[in-house]
Amino acid sequence: MAHSEQRRFHRIAYFTPARLQIEGKQILGVIHDLSLQGALLEVDQQQGVQTQQLAELHFSLGESLFEVEMSVEVVHLEPGRIGLKCLNIDMESISHLRRLVELNLGDEQLLERDLYAMLASQNPEP
């Protein structure tokens, strides 16, 4: 099944410089698309990156000086692209990211569904 068919979150096209810190090294790239639950990062080199590795993703939102930080897992690799799943994000970062996604989706109900799914995936019921 293609990755896009497996997605439960609405992604928006969003291009911004980003850095991925993974196992003591820094990989610079550009976010290609973004959701509340992850990102697709375009990179020139991904030497040594493997699926299931844990990392930290850092990027700024728009013209603001606010930097979003999220703990991520590498979930898929393609030539020149790294697919990342968000494992943890602080409340301030998720608030800014939510606003960006909301503005780009243009549909608050879609955003609310994404938020509910994100919270449910981070806090599974026993």
Image (cartoon, rainbow, N blue to C red):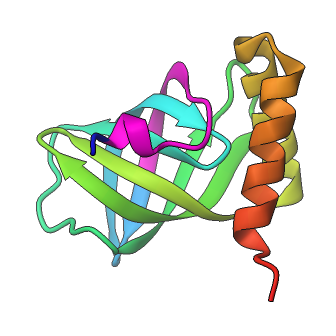
Can you see residue 90? Answer: yes
Q: Position of residue 12 (x, y in %)?
A: 57, 22
In the rendered image, the quadrant that contains the C terminus is bottom right
Part of the protein shown in magenta = 3-19
Which of the two residues, 73 or 111, is positioned nearer the viewer here? 111
Q: Quadrant of the N terminus?
A: top left
Q: Residue at x 80, y 22 (%)?
A: 102
Count up the numbered dots: 0
Q: Residue at x 30, y 48 (%)?
A: 82
Give the residue furthest to the top: 106
Q: Residue at x 88, y 56 (%)?
A: 91
- Which residue shows up at 76% across the image and 24% down it? 100
Residue 98 image offset from top left, x and y in percent: 81, 35
Q: Is residue 8 magenta?
A: yes
Give the answer, above or below, for where 124 lies relative to 73.
Answer: below
| Residue 78 rendering spot, x and y as whole percentages | 17, 44
Inspect the magenta stretch and tell me whether residue 110 lies in it. no
Q: Quadrant of residue 67?
A: top right
Residue 89 visible, this orientation = no
Task: Tell me which corner region of the image, top left, top right, bottom left or bottom right, holds residue 118.
Answer: bottom right
Q: Is residue 107 above or below residue 48?
A: above
Q: Position of residue 62 (x, y in %)?
A: 68, 20
Residue 86 appears left or right of 46: right
Query: On the image, which quarter does residue 101 sit in?
Result: top right
Query: In this image, 11 relative to 122: left or right?
Result: left
Relative to residue 13, is residue 88 depicted above or below? below
